Amino acid sequence: MARRRDSELDTATDGRYGAAMKKILFGSLFVGLVGLALGCTSTFKSVEADPGFSFLRGTLKGVLTSGLPKVEAATVAAMEELNFVAVDVISDKLKGTVSARMADGTKVTVKMQAEDFESTTVKIKVGTWGDQSISVQILRHIQRKL
């Protein structure tokens, strides 16, 4: 059996070390890209909003104690009161979406889903990443109209 020289052993070790470093580097890059694609996820119970509302991934979500038709009418009235433009309503008896644009062009979307005859789940999203303070203001206007 032939003996290896020290220089051959060092090369073999360096080769394995380099391969391991590549795996670690690409693994870290993959995890970073997945994290970036998912976006920042923070759960925040808003002090300003009702206790049943939460702000997650840019969307304010909660349940209002009114039926879907009333919530839809209140949402449209609130958006008109806030002088939003291009208010668009797509709705049936179970689900609905009210979309509009703010003066600066930011898209506002309010999605509604009937839970039963007297409660409706509401999801409010402002812009691409969500704006909590504006979402809460829209919620307050909707609640005032109910």
Image (tube, grey):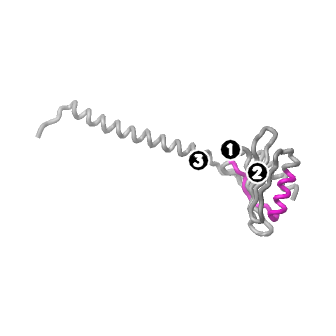
Membership of 66 in magenta stretch: yes
Q: Earlier in the sequence, mark 1 or mark 3?
A: 3
Tell me the amino acid under the disc marked 3. Answer: Leu
Q: Earlier in the sequence, mark 2 or mark 3?
A: 3
Q: Which residue is mark 2?
A: 47
In the structure shown, which secondary structural element does the residue marked by tag 3 occupy?
A: helix
In the structure shown, which secondary structural element does the residue marked by tag 2 occupy?
A: loop
4 with respect to 63 (left or right): left
Instruction: Report the magenta residues as a range.
Output: 58-78
Q: Which mark is residue 95?
A: none
28 with respect to 136 (left or right): left
In this orientation, does residue 53 appear? Answer: no
Q: Which residue is mark 3?
A: 38
Is residue 58 placed above or below 63 in the rendered structure? above
Quadrant location, the N terminus? top left
Q: Which residue is mark 1?
A: 129
Instruction: Report crowding for label 1: few under 14, some 14 to 19, many 20 or more residues within 10 A (C-alpha).
Output: few
**Residue 22 % position (x, y):** 39, 38
Q: Residue at x 18, y 32 (%)?
A: 5
Q: Residue at x 76, y 51 (%)?
A: 47
Instruction: Report crowding for label 2: few under 14, some 14 to 19, many 20 or more residues within 10 A (C-alpha).
Output: few
Displayed quadrant of residue 27:
top left
142 with respect to 35 (left or right): right
Membership of 28 in magenta stretch: no
Gap in Å between the C-alphas at discs 1 and 3?
A: 11 Å
**Residue 137 % position (x, y):** 81, 48
Displayed quadrant of residue 74:
bottom right
Displayed quadrant of residue 61:
bottom right
